[in-house]
Image (spheres, coloured by chain):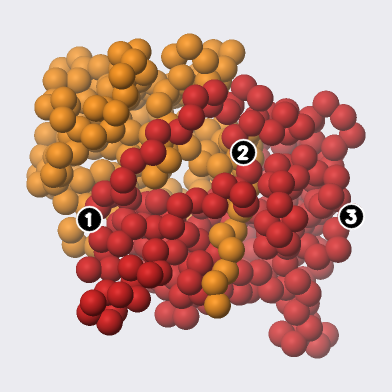
Chain colours: A orange, B red
C-alpha cells in the first residue's frame, strides 16, 4: 500500500538539543561526543583543508540558530566506500556570527561532477531543509552539470568557495541579491 | 542496481512552501529564487549510516536518560512508537532517528528558551534510536507541554516532538514534528498550517494506541514517518529482471 510522504516541519530554534546536544548545553549527553564532529578519521588520505563561512538571512543578519550537515566523497571520489559515516559531518553555527568551520579533505570529482561538498541547511524559519553545494575555486568546474545549468555569473559564484592556501570560505545567503543557489535534489 | 534508482520527487502538495508569511520567521529565511533541479547522482542516493553500536541503552528513554540515578522526568508517561517507511511502504531499516522536545511544562533545556515554565532537573529533552530490520522504533518520554512563542500575536505551539530522520540516501533527509491527536492548537498554529494539505497534517498526528498502552504504566501513541521512496515501477521491473 502506498503511503504519503511525511511533511517537513521547521527544525525550529532548538534543533541543537536533538542533534548537537552538548553544544546546546546538555552536559555529557551521549558521552560528550557530538555526532558528525569529524568528517573523516584523522588518518584519511587526501588534501586536508578547512572550510569556513557564515549564513545570512534576507536582511543580511546572521542566522545564528542554523544547523548544517555535509556529505562528500573521499579523495578517490567515493561516498563512504566502507559504509559508515565517513564523509558526513554536522555543525551548529555559532550563536554570535552564525559561523561554521569544517576540517576535511578535498573531495574528488565523480563522473562529470566536479569536486564538491553537499550541504543541507535547517533552522527556525526554514520549513523544508535547503540543499546546496560547495564547489572549490581552482578546480575543474566547467563541465559540472549543476554549475553549467546556471547562466548568471553572480548566481554561479554563490556555489564556489574562495581559496586562500588550504583554507576556503563559503558563505550562505538564504535570500536577497546574493542569494545562494539552492537545489531540488 | 537498486542503488541507482532515483527517489520519487518531494511531494510539494504535502511539504510546506519556503515562504509562509503567517510563520513570521520564514519571511527573511525563504529563498526568492526557484530551486535548481538536478538529476540525482550517487551522492544523493547514498548517505551516512550509523551502526547500532552508536546507541546507548537509555538513548531512547527520555524519562531517565538525563535524570539523576533513581530519579525520573516529571510528566505524563508515554511510549511513542511506529515505523520508518518509504512511500512504497517498505521498511527503512537501520536508520538513525533523533528526537527533541520541551518538558512537561513547555520549556526547552536551551539557553535561548526564556519561557517562565521551570526546567525539570531530570529532563534533557533529547533522545535517539536506530530502526530495526522492520523499520520499527520506539521511545519513552513524557508528554511535552504547549508553549507560547514570539510570532507577532498570542501564538502557542501544540504539544510536539521533533523528529530528525535519516534514510538510505542523502535526498531522503527529513526533519519534521509529531503532534498529538485532538490537540486544539493544531488548527491554530502557523507552523503546523504551513502545510496546506489536511492530509499532511493528519500524517504528522500521532494516534492514541490503547492496544500497546501498558496498564498502570504508560500510554502508547503510534506515529509512522514516511520518507521518499524509490520510483516503484523501475524497482519492480528490476526485480523481475526486465
Local SS, label 3: loop
User: What residue occupies the far front of the structure in this picture?
Assistant: B242
Chain identity of mark 3: B
Number of marks drawn: 3
Residue at 23% over, 77% down: B242
Disc 1 crowd rating (10 Å Cα; few below 14, some 14-19, many 20+) is: many
Nearer the N terminus, badge 2 or badge 3?
Answer: 2
* Residue topped by disc 1: A80
Residue at 62% over, 52% down: B14
The image quadrant where one finds the N terminus of chain B is: bottom left
Q: Is residue B34 visible?
A: yes
Q: Is residue B69 visible?
A: no
Residue B120 pos. (x, y %): 76, 53
In the image, taking residue B81 as reference, residue B74 lies left or right, namely: right
Disc 3 crowd rating (10 Å Cα; few below 14, some 14-19, many 20+) is: few
In the image, taking residue B218 as reference, residue A69 lies left or right, namely: left
Quadrant of res A83: bottom left
* Residue topped by disc 2: B17
Residue B184 is tagged as 3
Amino acid at each position: 500500500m502506498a503511503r504519503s510522504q511525511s511533511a517537513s516541519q521547521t527544525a525550529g530554534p532548538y534543533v541543537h538539543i536533538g542533534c548537537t546536544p552538548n553544544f546546546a548545553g546538555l552536559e555529557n549527553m551521549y558521552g560528550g561526543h557530538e555526532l558528525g564532529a569529524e568528517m573523516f578519521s584523522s588518518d584519511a588520505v587526501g588534501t586536508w583543508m578547512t572550510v569556513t563561512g557564515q549564513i545570512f538571512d534576507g536582511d543580511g543578519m546572521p542566522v545564528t540558530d542554523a544547523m548544517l550537515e555535509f556529505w562528500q566523497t573521499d579523495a578517490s571520489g567515493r561516498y563512504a566506500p566502507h559504509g559508515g559515516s565517513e564523509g558526513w559531518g554536522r555543525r551548529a553555527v555559532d550563536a554570535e556570527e552564525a559561523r561554521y568551520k569544517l576540517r576535511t579533505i578535498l573531495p574528488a570529482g565523480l563522473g562529470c561532477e566536479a569536486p564538491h561538498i553537499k550541504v543541507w541547511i535547517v533552522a527556525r524559519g526554514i520549513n523544508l531543509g535547503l540543499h546546496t553545494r560547495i564547489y572549490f575555486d581552482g578546480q575543474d568546474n566547467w563541465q559540472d552539470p549543476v554549475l553549467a545549468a546556471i547562466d548568471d555569473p553572480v548566481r554561479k559564484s554563490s556555489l564556489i568557495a574562495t581559496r586562500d592556501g588550504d583554507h576556503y570560505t563559503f558563505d550562505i545567503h538564504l535570500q536577497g541579491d546574493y542569494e545562494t543557489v539552492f537545489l531540488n535534489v | 542496481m537498486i542503488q541507482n534508482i532515483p527517489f520519487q520527487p518531494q511531494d510539494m502538495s504535502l511539504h510546506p512552501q519556503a515562504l509562509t508569511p503567517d510563520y513570521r520567521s520564514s519571511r527573511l529565511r525563504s529563498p526568492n529564487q526557484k530551486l535548481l533541479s538536478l538529476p540525482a547522482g550517487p551522492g544523493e542516493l547514498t548517505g551516512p549510516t550509523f551502526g547500532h553500536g552508536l546507541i546507548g541503552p537509555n538513548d531512547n528513554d527520555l524519562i531517565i536518560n538525563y535524570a539523576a540515578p533513581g530519579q525520573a522526568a516529571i510528566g505524563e508517561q508515554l511510549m511513542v512508537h511506529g515505523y520508518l517507511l518509504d512511500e512504497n511502504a517498505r521498511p527503512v531499516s537501520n536508520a538513525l532517528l533523533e528526537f527533541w522536545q520541551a518538558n512537561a511544562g513547555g520549556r526547552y533545556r536551551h539557553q535561548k528558551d526564556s519561557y517562565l515554565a521551570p526546567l525539570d532537573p531530570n529532563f534533557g529533552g533529547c533522545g535517539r534510536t536506530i530502526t530495526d530490520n522492520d523499520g520499527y522504533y520506539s521511545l519513552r518520554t513524557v508528554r511535552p507541554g504547549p508553549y507560547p512563542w514570539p510570532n507577532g500575536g498570542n501564538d502557542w505551539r501544540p504539544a510536539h516532538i521533533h523528529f530528525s530522520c535519516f534514510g538510505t540516501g542523502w535526498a531522503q533527509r527529513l526533519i519534521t514534528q509529531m503532534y498529538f491527536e485532538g490537540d486544539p492548537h493544531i488548527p491554530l498554529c502557523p507552523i503546523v498550517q504551513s502545510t496546506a494539505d489536511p492530509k499532511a497534517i493528519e500524517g504528522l498526528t500521532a494516534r492514541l494506541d490503547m492496544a500497546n498502552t501498558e496498564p498502570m504504566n504508560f500510554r502508547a501513541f503510534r506515529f509512522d514517518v514516511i520518507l521518499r521512496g524509490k520510483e516503484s515501477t523501475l524497482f519492480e521491473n528490476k526485480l523481475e529482471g526486465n
